[in-house]
Amino acid sequence: MIQHNKMFEPSLLVVPLGSLVDFPNLDPWFHNVFSLYRGKRFDLGLYEAGAQKTIKFDRPGASYIFCNIHPEMAAIVLTVDSNFYAISDKSGRVSIAHVPRGKYFLRAWYENTDSSSLDALTRPVEIDRNNDGLLSLAIPVTEEKSPKHKNKYGRDYDRKVTEY
């Protein structure tokens, strides 16, 4: 998950449980990447342009990623306990190729949906040779997440520090 132009790219990364995620700093200034909200909790500390740090995501769920210097930087690493996953396209369609025959649980995740609504969408599915597509899901948007957040110390960002 690169840091470039005071942004994380991509802003959403889905990884299987146990994955190592690199956080290279491609900006010409320092960053301090952290996650203290749900999911994997970590603080990479201050590191300079050209440096890279790595975190192992060993806890399922959404990890909300921020920079302690630049409040506009925000991303999510979604850790899943499966090797079969996908991110929808702009129209909301998802395709997962080469899923072997068998019984699975289908789970959906969307940032602006509460967990009880998502839990209600979880269901068993069976993949067999006659499947040419799965079902359609409607995910209710229950709240818009605010991009505002506190720094890693639980305080508001100091605007004087973040203006460079």
Image (tube, rainbow, N blue to C red):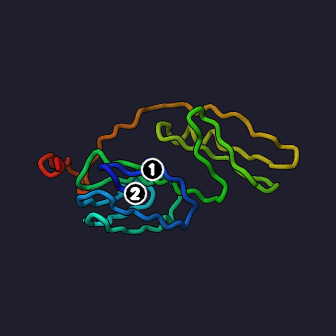
* Residue type, label 2: Ile
Q: CA distance from mark 2 to mark 1?
A: 7 Å
Which residue is painted at 56% across and 63% down in the image?
17
Mark 2 lies on a secondary structure that is strand
Of the 4 image quadrants, the one containing the N terminus is: bottom left
Give the left or right position of residue 93, taking residue 133 as reference: left
User: Going 59% across and 41% down the picture, which residue do you hit?
Assistant: 88
Circle 1: element type: loop
User: How busy is the neighbourhood of tag 2: few (under 14 within 10 Å), some, or many (20 plus)?
Assistant: some
**Residue designated by label 1:** 10
Front residue of 62 and 47: 47
In front of the other: 151 or 45: 45
- Left or right: 31 as drawn, with respect to 11: left
Percent across and percent down for residue 133 are 77, 40
Closer to the N terminus: mark 2 or mark 1?
2
Left/right of residue 163 with respect to residue 13 in the rendered view: left
- Identify the residue position indicated by label 2 in the image: 2
The outermost residue toward the left is: 160
